[in-house]
Image: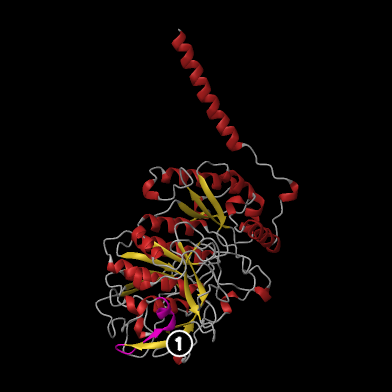
Amino acid sequence: MSKRIVKLVLLSLILFASCSKEESMDKKIAIDQSQKNPLTPTQINAKIDESLNVKGIFNWRDASSHLLWSAVVNGNNIVTIGFGNSATNFERAKTSNNANIQNDLLKIIMKYEDTTLDKVLIMADADLNLMDVMISKQETIIALRQSKYIRYIEPADYSYLNNRNTKNNNVTASSSSSSSGCGYESTTLAAADYTTTTPNAKVPWTFTQHNIPNAWAISSGRGITIGIIDTGVSPNQSLLGSNFNNGLSSGRTIQKNGVYIDSIWPWSTTTDGVNDLCGHGTSMASVAAAPRNDKGLPVGVAYNANLVTYRAASNVVLDGFQEQEAVKKAFTALGNNSNVKIISMSMGHIFSVGKIEDAIRFAYGKGKLIFCAAGTSTSFTTFVGVIFPASMSETVAVTGVREGATYQACDDCHTGSKVEFTVAMQRSASGNTVPVDSYYENQSDYVGGSSVATATTAGIAALVWAKNPTWTRAQVLTKMRQSASFSSNRNATYGYGNINALLAVQ
């Protein structure tokens, strides 16, 4: 008799819990009258700037539902949802119930939006526990945030930069010769900024500062593949194309990929190709692995390394749905490419982007050594320290410094406690930066900022890994740290400082 009573009690509790859950789901979400209208872009940016100034970071996870919804409304109603069984459960292959979680969340969206699946779901990622959806109601966001399976909800197309004053919105107009922005310039190199090595290649002055030419006697990067996520590679520069094996470079490959979709529509699927339409990506590929050529043009650090390049953005600031989506695709693709050891990205954003975080952690989990630029200042980002994603623990942040024994950041370069390495990339007297192969055939140029510092460091990593092909990422990184200026006492601003490439490969 007592057992029967226990069973009845348990059944009653189960039914009560079930009913309570349904009642909770059906309960109307109340929104205060003061928060029924969305904030303006100016108001949204002011709150973002306040967080950046006070905390040094901004993350949509910490934003109120009203602020988040306001950004969604001002960002074409496109939302990225990261889900999983825990905060670190981002990979589908490691989530047996990922389909069930996704379907449950979609049901919540369809219920509160009062619409059908075809009007809600834009894309569900194949590798990561995330999806892009359409949401218009604040109630939907509040309901989703109540789910234990939500890792983050972010406005996927809110443009922080485009919503700033026009006079400040000049980040993409800067020249590659003076910063890390776009530009197609070609420049005659000053004789003091290079030396010549066999068969007829120009060695940038900064390589000598880091003892790279002497390191070449031991390693040239052969057998190592570097992935570069940037704006693509110029179709007009044969040293990064048909002449990739020119001179003393041989037996290697360059593979060019395009994942960036130049469209305002999130449903578009056609990319604009693999070619660089900015100039920045060409410079990064050049400094990392341009051939030791016989054409009188600058050589790259790892001149016998392979390259896999991705056109993932139109410019250097990852602000908007299509660029952030493309960078996510590039990182996951490189993560899945077993040939790639090193990933270099000299682009970024002022604050974190969930889908890019997930993709970087995915690639990191595959053993990739990831270098990212600490940041290059514009008129409205000078208050930011190390930018995203260089700020992540899974990436190695690199910045640029001036030539000389005393460490001083370059004119545009960000610094901070998260910086690991520096590269001397600005001359003390002339202010000239690093010689690279130009966007155009048989021409050269200069490039600066933390961008070129990052690609240079990725090249040094390739030299170290080629010398020690059985090493892990951790061993390569440890050797680089031990070979840098502040190896025994990491600097609070410049990390381990400048790397001595010869020591790194010995």
Q: Is residue 227 magenta?
A: no
Residue in front for this viewpoint, 121 or 401? 401
> How was this image coloured?
secondary structure
Q: Provide the residue span drawn in magenta.
A: 198-210
**Can you say which quadrant of the picture contains the C terminus?**
bottom left
Left or right: 238 as drawn, with respect to 485: left
Q: Residues within 10 Å of mark 1 (few under 14, many from 20)?
A: some
Residue in front for this viewpoint, 264 or 210? 210
Residue 213: image quadrant is bottom left
Residue in front for this viewpoint, 384 or 28? 384
Residue 157: give x, y in percent of width and height: 57, 62
Residue 393: give x, y in percent of width and height: 47, 56
**Can you say which quadrant of the picture contains the N terminus?**
top left
Which residue is pictured at 50% across the width and 82% down the height? 433
Residue 218: image quadrant is bottom left
Circle 1 SS class? helix
What's under tag 1, amino acid-wise? Asp
Residue 198: give x, y in percent of width and height: 30, 87
Q: Is residue 249 above or below residue 366?
A: below
Residue 487 visible to the viewer? yes
Residue 505: give x, y in percent of width and height: 32, 69
Q: Is residue 208 magenta?
A: yes
Which residue is pictured at 41% across the width and 50% down the height? 91
Q: Is residue 354 above or below residue 430?
A: above
* Residue furthest out toward the right: 34
Which residue is pictured at 47% across the width and 80% down the height? 279
Report the residue marked by disc 1: 193
Q: Is residue 377 above or below residue 388?
A: below
Which residue is pictured at 28% across the width and 65% down the height? 468
